[in-house]
Image (spheres, helix red, strand yellow):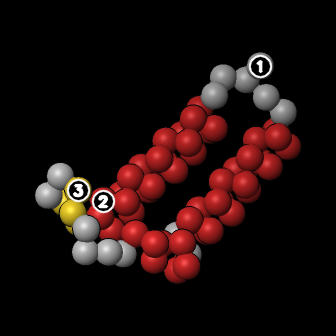
């Protein structure tokens, strides 16, 4: 894959992380709701964090074309 394309995708992922973990959007998960006995806020944080790490690993470890 082209190096500039990888750089652009990593920059887009960085900006998405900045938006997802910013106050207005993260406050949507801050409720007293429990899901399978777990509080929704920390569960949402860890699921988003794991998904972003997975996307980052997928972008960086892709075989070059």
Please, which residue is most extreme toward the bottom here? 23
Q: Mark 3 — residue?
A: 35
Residue ID at (52%, 50%): 52
Q: Mark 1 — residue?
A: 65
Q: Which numbered disc flags the more N-terminal residue, 3 or 2?
A: 3
Does residue 54 sit above or below 38 in this rendering?
Answer: above
Q: CA distance from mark 3 to mark 1?
A: 42 Å
Looking at the image, is mark 3 or mark 1 nearer the viewer?
3
User: How many numbered callouts?
Assistant: 3
Q: Which numbered disc flags the more N-terminal residue, 3 or 1?
A: 3
Left or right position of 31 against 37: right
Residue ID at (57%, 45%): 56
Looking at the image, is mark 3 or mark 2 nearer the viewer?
3
Q: Position of residue 50 (x, y in %)?
A: 42, 49
Q: Position of residue 23 (x, y in %)?
A: 52, 80
Q: Which numbered disc flags the more N-terminal residue, 2 or 1?
A: 2
Q: Are marks 3 and 2 in contact (CB under 8 Å)?
A: yes
Q: CA distance from mark 3 to mark 2?
A: 8 Å
Q: Quadrant of residue 18?
A: bottom right
Q: Quadrant of residue 33?
A: bottom left
Q: Are marks 2 and 1 in contact (CB under 8 Å)?
A: no
Left or right position of 62 against 37: right
Q: Mark 2 — residue?
A: 43
**Quadrant location of the C terminus in the rendered image:** top right
């Amino acid at each position: 894959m082209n190096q500039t394309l990888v750089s652009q995708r990593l920059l887009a992922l960085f900006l998405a992380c900045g938006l997802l973990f910013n106050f207005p959007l993260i406050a949507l998960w801050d409720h007293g709701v429990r899901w399978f006995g777990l509080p929704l806020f920390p569960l949402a944080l860890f699921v988003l964090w794991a998904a972003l790490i997975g996307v980052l690993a997928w972008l960086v470890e892709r075989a070059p074309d």
